[in-house]
């Protein structure tokens, strides 16, 4: 199944020269959304994770249903100030500046096997920061799964220490 047939590509959004991959066309189609979740589950299940981690916000759209299907927990990774209890954070460099991610300090027990799930792998910066955040809480990141990969941005290179897969490549 080619998931690219169900992802709308919008030229020059959000700015000129960008080719935006709009997943709302896949999400609104129940059959395709289910197929994407099922495909993610099929690839992740052999890794036998203890928990699925999803970065804000679209990682929630794929990570939570994958966790549900596997019968395991889901842990959100959020932007600063969104979590109500004690957090651990990771700051990372962007093209122009920095960003920070947070997770509850007690969300994952040391040694738990974690798979990170998100909608898109681009440059790999957010995913590497998420992996580093998981290391800080003592988790073992055993893999990463994505709906879409923008392979021309070489995000896999930053994630060379982790098994990575995607369902649709551009």
Image (cartoon, rainbow, N blue to C red):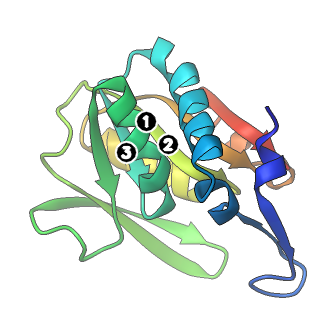
The residue at 90%/80% (across/down) is: 17
Asked if labels 3 and 2 touch by Cβ distance under 8 angstroms, the answer is no
List x then y, in percent, for residue 54.
41, 49
**What residue is shown with label 2?**
117
C-alpha span from label 1 to label 2: 8 Å
The residue at 26%/26% (across/down) is: 112
Q: Nearer the viewer, residue 51 or 40?
A: 40
The residue at 35%/49% (across/down) is: 133
**What residue is shown with label 3?**
64
Q: Which mark is residue 108?
A: none
List x then y, in percent, for residue 42.
55, 20
Helix, strand or loop at label 2? It is: strand
> Can the viewer see residue 131 in this picture?
no
**What residue is shown with label 1?**
66
Q: Quadrant of the N terminus?
A: top right
Q: Residue furthest left?
A: 85
C-alpha span from label 1 to label 3: 5 Å
Asked if labels 2 and 1 touch by Cβ distance under 8 angstroms, the answer is yes
| Front tag of 2 and 3 | 3
> Can the viewer see residue 2 in this picture?
yes
Disc 3 residue crowd, few under 14, some 14–19, many 20+, Cα 10 Å: many
| Front tag of 1 and 2 | 1
Q: Is residue 116 left or right of residue 156?
A: left
Asked if labels 3 and 1 touch by Cβ distance under 8 angstroms, the answer is yes
Q: Quarter of the image holding residue 136?
A: top left
């Amino acid at each position: 199944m080619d998931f690219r047939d169900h992802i709308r590509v919008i030229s020059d959004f959000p700015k000129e020269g960008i080719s935006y991959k709009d997943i709302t066309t896949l999400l609104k189609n129940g059959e395709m959304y289910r197929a994407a979740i099922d495909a993610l589950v099929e690839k992740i299940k052999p890794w036998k994770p203890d928990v699925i981690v999803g970065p804000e916000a679209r990682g929630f759209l794929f990570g939570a249903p994958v966790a549900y299907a596997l019968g395991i927990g889901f842990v959100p990774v959020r932007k600063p100030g969104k979590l109500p209890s004690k957090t651990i954070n990771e700051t990372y460099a962007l093209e122009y500046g920095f960003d920070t991610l947070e997770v509850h300090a007690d969300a994952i027990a040391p040694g738990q096997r974690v798979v990170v799930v998100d909608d898109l792998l681009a440059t790999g910066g957010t995913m590497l920061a998420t992996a580093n955040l998981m290391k800080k809480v003592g988790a073992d990141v055993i893999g990463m799964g994505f709906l879409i990969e923008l392979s021309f941005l070489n995000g896999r290179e930053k994630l060379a220490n982790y098994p990575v897969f995607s369902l649709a490549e551009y």
